[in-house]
Image (cartoon, helix red, strand yellow):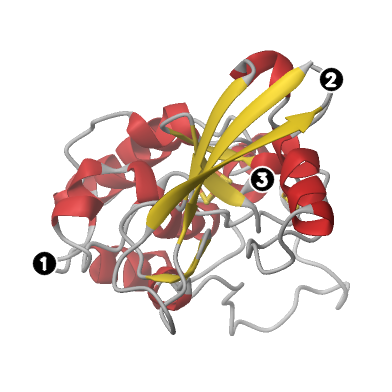
């Protein structure tokens, strides 16, 4: 089949603004959008720039807008997009080149959540591990699946309106530790999320949940954090 793919191109060293370039390639419906991009880069234009690493939906580096929706190029089949594809960079972050955006502000917000285990109490008697019940582990199981692809944050209308908003991905990663019974810094993280650009900027648009390639119920996780903040109960 012939695939027609329209790709946003922008080289800040040469272009005042971006434009779309259309390529026609032979492919099959089982090709992934990433395969099509690789083919174009290898055969038509080696300057085409996009991020990718694992090619298996694990590293989260190839988030892009495909036919208007945030997706991972390595997990999106031509069968699902159809033979006419438009590929653009994710929104809300500065474009560095073509489909590559500056992820620094996204990771800065992630780091604000202290996304690491905090517990300064002495280890239990056995001296080896802090035990947890299966039920306690289940409370944050879903949010451990985040691969930091930014599909959620960059599909959020509140984030588009205010780039200072910490965004859904940051809250998901705060959730992962707030609800971990072994961690001792939940109150600290909730305080950070109570700041002006924190969780209050979420207006429950659900775009984040729809965009997440890991099928994390992002809005539900944000709701649980809001509830913990309001009730003081975790
Ligand atoms: Fe990506 Fe989902 Fe994590 Fe958001 S919550 S960064 S969409 S994996
Ligand atoms: Fe790693 Fe797509 S290349 S998630």
Q: Position of residue 224 (x, y in %)?
A: 36, 38
Residue 17 in the image, given as x and y percentages of width and height = 30, 66
Q: From mark 2 to mark 1, how far is it between C-alphas?
A: 48 Å
Residue 134 is at least partly visible in this image: no
Mark 3 or 2 closer to N-term? 2
Q: Looking at the image, can residue 128 be seen? A: yes
Q: Nearer the viewer, residue 10 or 189?
A: 10
Q: Which mark is residue 145?
A: 3
Marks 2 and 1, the one that precedes in the sequence: 2
Residue located beneath label 2 in the image: 28
- Give above or below for 153 relative to 205: below
Q: CA distance from mark 3 to mark 2?
A: 31 Å
Residue sitting nearer the eye, 159 or 17? 17
Say if disc 3 is inside 8 Å of ligand 1: yes
Q: Assess mark 1: CB under 8 A from ligand 1?
A: no
Q: Are marks 2 and 1 in contact (CB under 8 Å)?
A: no
Q: Residues within 10 Å of mark 2 (few under 14, many from 20)?
A: some
> On the rendered structure, is 99 left or right of 18?
right
Query: In what element is the residue under mark 2?
Result: loop
- Helix, strand or loop at disc 3? helix
Tell me, yes or no, whether the two marked residues, 3 and 2, touch with CB atoms within 8 Å.
Answer: no
Label 3 neighbour load within 10 Å: few <14, some 14-19, many 20+: some
* Horizontal and vertical percent position of residue 127: 86, 78
Ranked by sequence position, the earlier of labels 1 and 3 is: 3
Label 1 close to label 3 by CB (< 8 Å): no
Q: Mark 2 CB in 8 Å range of ligand 2? A: no
Determine which of the numbered discs, if any, sits on residue 167 in the image.
none
Q: Which mark is residue 196?
A: 1
Drawn side of residue 37 relative to residue 119, left or right:
right
Viewer-proximal residue among 197 and 152 = 152
**Quadrant, the N terminus:** top right
């Amino acid at each position: 089949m012939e695939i027609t793919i329209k790709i946003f191109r922008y080289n800040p060293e040469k272009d005042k603004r971006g434009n779309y370039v259309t390529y026609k390639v032979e492919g099959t419906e089982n090709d992934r959008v990433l395969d099509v991009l690789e083919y174009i880069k290898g055969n038509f234009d080696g300057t085409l720039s996009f991020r990718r690493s694992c090619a298996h939906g694990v590293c989260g580096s190839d988030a892009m807008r495909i036919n208007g929706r945030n997706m991972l190029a390595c997990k999106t089949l031509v069968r699902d997009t159809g033979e006419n594809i438009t590929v653009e960079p994710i929104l809300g972050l500065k474009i560095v080149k073509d489909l590559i955006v500056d992820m620094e502000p996204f990771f800065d917000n992630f780091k604000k959540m202290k996304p690491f285990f905090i517990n300064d109490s002495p280890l239990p008697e056995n001296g080896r591990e802090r035990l947890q019940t299966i039920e306690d582990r289940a409370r944050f199981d879903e949010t451990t699946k985040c691969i930091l692809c930014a599909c959620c944050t960059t599909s959020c209308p509140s984030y588009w309106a205010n780039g200072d908003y910490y965004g859904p991905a940051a809250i998901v990663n705060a959730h992962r530790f707030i609800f971990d019974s072994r961690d001792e810094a939940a109150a600290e993280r909730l305080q950070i999320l109570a700041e002006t650009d924190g969780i209050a900027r979420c207006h429950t648009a659900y775009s984040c949940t729809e965009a997440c390639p890991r099928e994390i119920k992002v809005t539900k996780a944000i709701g649980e954090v809001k509830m913990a903040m309001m009730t003081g109960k975790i």
